Image (tube, helix red, strand yellow):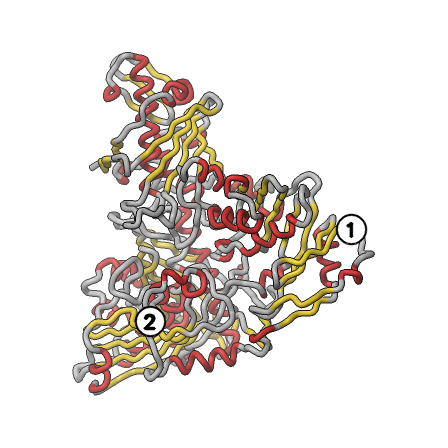
Amino acid sequence: MSNSIDLGRRGFIIGAASLGGGLALGFDIPFDAEPASGEPLAAPEVNAWVVVKPDETVVIRIARSEMGQGALTGLAQLVAEELDCDWARVTTEYPTPAENAARHRVWGEYATGGSRSIRGSQDYVRKGGAAARQMLIEAAANEWKVPAAECRAEKGVISHPASGRSTTYGKVADVAAKRTPPTHVVLKDPRDWKIAGKGVKRLDTIDKTTGKMIYGVDVTLPGMFNAAIKACPVFDGKLQSYDESKIANFKGVKKVVRVGDDAVAVVADTWWRAKTALDALPIVWDEGPNAKASSAETAKWLAEGLNDSQPAVTGDEIGAARATIAKAPKTVEAVYSYPHQNQAAMEPLNATALYTPERCEVWTGTQNGEAALAAVAEASGLPLEKCDVHKVMLGGGFGRKGFTDYVTQAVLIAKALPGTPVKLLWAREEDMTQGKYHPVTQCKLTGAFDADNKLTALHMRISGQSILSSVRPQAVKNGVDPAVFQGLVSNGEAQIGYDVPNLLVEHAMRNPPVPPGWWRGVNINQNAIYLECFMDELAHAAGEDPVAFRRKLMAKRPKHSAVLDAVAERIGWNSPALDGVHRGVAAFMGYGSYVAAAAEISVPSADKIKIVRLVAATDPGYAVNPAQIERQVAGSFVYGLSALFFGAITMKDGRVEQMNFDSYDSMRLKDMPKVECITMPSGGFWGGVGEPTICVAAPAVLNAYFAATGKRIRSIPLKDANISFA
């Protein structure tokens, strides 16, 4: 069955123009409604752009950022599928945010995060491909004087079977560009996909493996200088003074620049000379009110927030959890905690800026091109139309490159050297200590059983940091940050998988001075550990098998139970494990997808864990590229398990203690088994892939550790308990 979509004036606006003798189509799909005030939408309309060249090359312009997750290839697959072009001739490019603004946002949202690249774009990019195909077919049919309905297209070739005539997209592109765009397109049923839904090779692999790919750190412009920067090592501290005379004779140094009120940069002919001079520059900091802040102090403060006497807001409430717990014959209580984490992308933050009084341009890897453009305009003091951001590939992002502080810094430095391009590159130490970190939280969980040993109530009280209160305070309504409750509420794109008669989920907001930010998976990471490890505790308290216990509570949630059943079956849950091998499971929902994991581990000694086997199941609704999904799931497990074993950003005397990878470690290849990935798209919805599965790896391993040792670990990283890989 096909997807027939009616596109009215508000639904689909196509601007066509002839570029280089080809067909260029811009797609503008506004949201359903504008604000009642008549003001423009806060978020731009979503869109895409396809170019068909005379040589049959199809250029698909992608607004979302590619940072290793494969969005570039997946989005191109969706367009190519509806376009019916030759996949071997597909290439991609980024439009710039300024082009987008000048064309009234015809390419739409540039933000990349929340696993939204595919699920947030699939509708309009598919419509774009279908509209382009229809225009190309109509152009050929008009030339042949035959009904368009009698023509068909396949791999970029248009044919009229009745007459035997055929032509190619490139040959009719000019004519097609002059046609009136369609107001109605028909999308293919996913069951009929030939390009989408297949594990095609990524479009960026060859350039990455041959070194041809350009990342931000690779950008080089004629006459370019390099900058190294230091900001106050204490959050909210200020730059008091510096003595640049001490480095006046350093070779290659061009200029010392005060950057805002909290940082200083050195500009030189090479980055290493800039960094060397900066390290030698005497700097006096005003450390401000957080000079004595520490993680120990924060932990104590958060623990106080777990007390019911302290203020809290409600994320979800069903029935009367408190009253049920108060009179229950049996209760179980536990407290878990999760630390700050750093995104620790392999490519440190960087941006290259060229400023003149007439124009300012920036070349950078960013997860949010529109926000970066706004930062350039604000820092340069120039109108938006005189600024631009040229996006390049990201060497990892994980949420950190959705912020624009480094873009602002690059422009401010470039303003001190008008007409000279300057590349700002953060040192690894700066990247580690000036982060926007995964929020720190603690959680107290209480479960109640009736006389028949049935779970009757669950109370979760989270105490800790709110990202939105810092980065998007307008989204916090009546003290509620909805993102805090990811995976713990009964509706939305991150629903709790269990039906408990009485449920209460609360948040006592407590924001320490460490700035919070998005970190791959965001709040489902700690919430999955809290809920899934506690579910294991409840199962054992009830004397039940952990999988069977979960299944009962998932009886009315078939998609949650399906992924749980899939990993349990694959791992052989109902059959004995090998001697010395123990199993654990976890299931969760995040970013619209249903995920589960099963782990087998051995514990050769009290302080060693060997991960023997990992199984993951994902139901994202639709699978655009199953091969990419497998790689994303495996990569997310590495990320999640690295956090479990090693990850923690701690603060002492107002300073972040982890300066580099020697103190903020990651898994090694020898410690990571192959992840057996079960991709089981059930259709009917679009879920994310890059972030959901990260959250189930850690609780599955922690539950297996309990099965092996009888000990519960409720605080991570495991290195703090002196546990490492065997």
Give the residue displayed 46% in from the left and 41% down from the top: 202
Question: Sequence order check: which comes first, mark 1 or mark 2?
Answer: 1
Secondary structure beneath label 2: helix
Name the foreground residue: 69 vs 523. Answer: 523
Residue annotated with mark 1: 252
Give the residue displayed 54% in from the left and 42% down from the top: 387
Give the residue displayed 73% in from the left and 51% down from the top: 268
Give the residue displayed 63% in from the left and 61% down from the top: 263
Name the foreground residue: 336 vs 462. Answer: 462
Rendering coords of residue 264 (x, y %): 67, 60
Q: Which quadrant of the figure has residue 44?
A: top left
Q: Is residue 219 above or below residue 91?
A: below
Is residue 262 toward the left or the right of residue 482 in the image?
right
Rendering coords of residue 351 (x, y %): 59, 49
Secondary structure beneath label 1: loop
**Circle on res. 548:** none
Residue annotated with mark 2: 531
